Amino acid sequence: MLPRRDAVSPLLPDAALSPLLSGVLLAFTVDFESASRISLPIGATSLRVLDRSGTRINDLPRLTGVSQEANAMCTGWLERHGCAVIAPDPSARRGKVVRPTPKGEKAQHKHRRLLGATEDAWRSTYGADVVAELKAALPDVVGDGTLISFPLAPASPLAPGLVPYPDSWRAKVRRPETLPHHPMVLHRGGYPDGS
């Protein structure tokens, strides 16, 4: 958890950015999840992109920025907890769609509300200026989060680091359109996209 505002020491010039941002993300996740029954990774990935008309299961990796396996874990959890329904795709001979239930739609609204409430709590704890500076610095790291024009003109500075080795399985699958809104490492370990 982040130290109290009055206990924050100045950052050392040689402090690595990745562990610092990971600590902030972990603290935010813990604060968010203290008021939510749905984990921040599930809410920020699969739950975020579901809509009443149905979202094709095969489109989830592209829309969420996390792997098919991670989305399967998320949608399975949402279905088991009454937040989503998985059914055959009525517009195709094959495939399935996932739709939020009324409980799932309420969970989507609560997720967005809790994101704002957690951010407001951080403003009170750490100061509005600190939160504003953090938010202002994030676009330099992630851009707008999209990878749609990837690899020609990536919108995220992280996109060049996501180019897969040509002979790997990642080079053979459809690329996501967005960075994950929250990293997701499954029980098998692996990449932050949950693969």
Image (cartoon, rainbow, N blue to C red):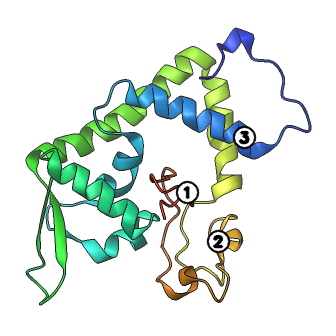
Rendered position, 5 above or below 158: above
Q: Residue 186: x, y in percent?
A: 45, 54
Sequence-first tag of 1 and 2: 2
Rendered position, 148 above or below 137: below
The residue labelled by disc 1 is: 192
Q: Residue 54: x, y in percent?
A: 17, 68
Along the viewing direction, whichever of 38 and 128 lies nearer the viewer: 38
Give me the C-alpha separation between circle 2 and circle 3. Answer: 19 Å
Along the viewing direction, whichever of 117 and 14 lies nearer the viewer: 14
Sequence-first tag of 1 and 3: 3
* Residue at 47% from the left image edge and 29% from the top image edge: 30
Q: Quadrant of the N terminus?
A: top right
Q: Amino acid at mark 1?
A: Pro
Residue at the front extreme? 188
Q: Residue 4: x, y in percent?
A: 64, 13
Q: Amino acid at mark 2?
A: Leu
Q: Residue 70: x, y in percent?
A: 39, 60
* Residue at 38% from the left image edge and 55% from the top image edge: 45
Q: Amino acid at mark 3?
A: Pro
Task: Point out which mark residue 162 bears.
Answer: 2
Task: Point out which mark residue 19 bears.
Answer: 3
Are the residues at dot 1 and dot 3 in contact (C-beta closer than 8 Å)? no
Along the viewing direction, whichever of 120 and 37 lies nearer the viewer: 37
Q: Quadrant of residue 53?
A: bottom left
Mark 3 secondary-structure assignment: helix
